[in-house]
Amino acid sequence: MLLLAAWMIGLIASGGGALDQAAKPSLPDPLTFPNKREVVMRATRAVFEDLGYKVELEDVTGGRLTTRPYEFLSGSLTSSELDKVALKGDTVTGTWLRARYTVEALFENPSPTQTIITVRTQMEALNRDLSGEEKYVPLQSLGPVEKRILGKISMKLLGTEPEFKDKKGFWDQKPTSPTKVKKPPVA
């Protein structure tokens, strides 16, 4: 019993030990579609617009679409939310203030009627160190953003998009005034 208690104390002190599993990148493989490159590029551009990305570079002959940096995290929960989508790499002292990424889609043609699409993100986060200096630090993506984008492109190209729109969350809704409650007359 004493040995078990000592092992548990050691496990807690080490931050989890063998039970703690570090997140590993799981970037999606490129997808192949039985469509011409122009069709796949148009669908990708439409998905980028649906997701709120602004296309900065569109190279049709080179087969490349790149977005402007998209800020997706800010505030006090940035550090913990960042752990869900990226590896922070080196231990940086200070506070994580916000995070952003740029999406790049690359299109290849192994044949005239096939297109291979690869989606990658370049993530970075703004860190304020103890001296007050702020700088963007590059991060390694874990893959969920890329998987989500490729999934939406697949649904658009294969015609399996859901009929319904995503419901807005509580914080995305416009404020409404409360409805007045009529009181029954007092007899």
Image (tube, grey):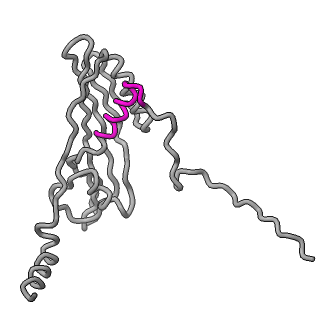
Q: Position of residue 182 (x, y in %)?
A: 82, 65
Question: Which residue is depicted at the point 27% across and 15% down?
Answer: 61
Which residue is depicted at the point 25% across and 41% down?
122
Q: Is residue 148 magenta?
A: yes
Where is residue 63? Give x, y as percent: 26, 21
* Farthest residue, direction top: 112
Query: Which residue is most to the right?
Result: 187
Task: Determine if the magenta segment contains residue 175.
Answer: no
Quarter of the image that includes the N terminus: bottom left
Which of 29/41 is in front? 29
| Residue located farthest toward the bottom when viewing the structure as drawn | 2
Q: Is residue 17 above or below residue 29?
A: below
Q: Is residue 97 above or below residue 160?
A: below
**Residue nearer the viewer, 90 or 183:** 183
Query: Dividing the picture into quarters, in which one does residue 14 lie?
Result: bottom left
Instruction: Choose top left, top right, bottom left or bottom right for residue 185.
Output: bottom right
Q: Looking at the magenta stretch, what is its main secondary structure?
A: helix
Q: Quadrant of the C terminus?
A: bottom right
Viewer-nearest residue: 117 or 58: 117
Q: Residue at x 16, y 65 (%)?
A: 20
State whether residue 98 is above or below residue 2.
Answer: above
Q: Which residues are magenta?
A: 147-160
Report the number of numbered marks: 0
**Residue at x 51% of width, y 37% of height:** 164
Where in the figure is residue 66, as x and y percent of width and height? Answer: 31, 31
Q: Quadrant of residue 134?
A: bottom left
Q: Residue furthest left?
A: 3
Give residue 152's position: percent from left, percent from top: 37, 34
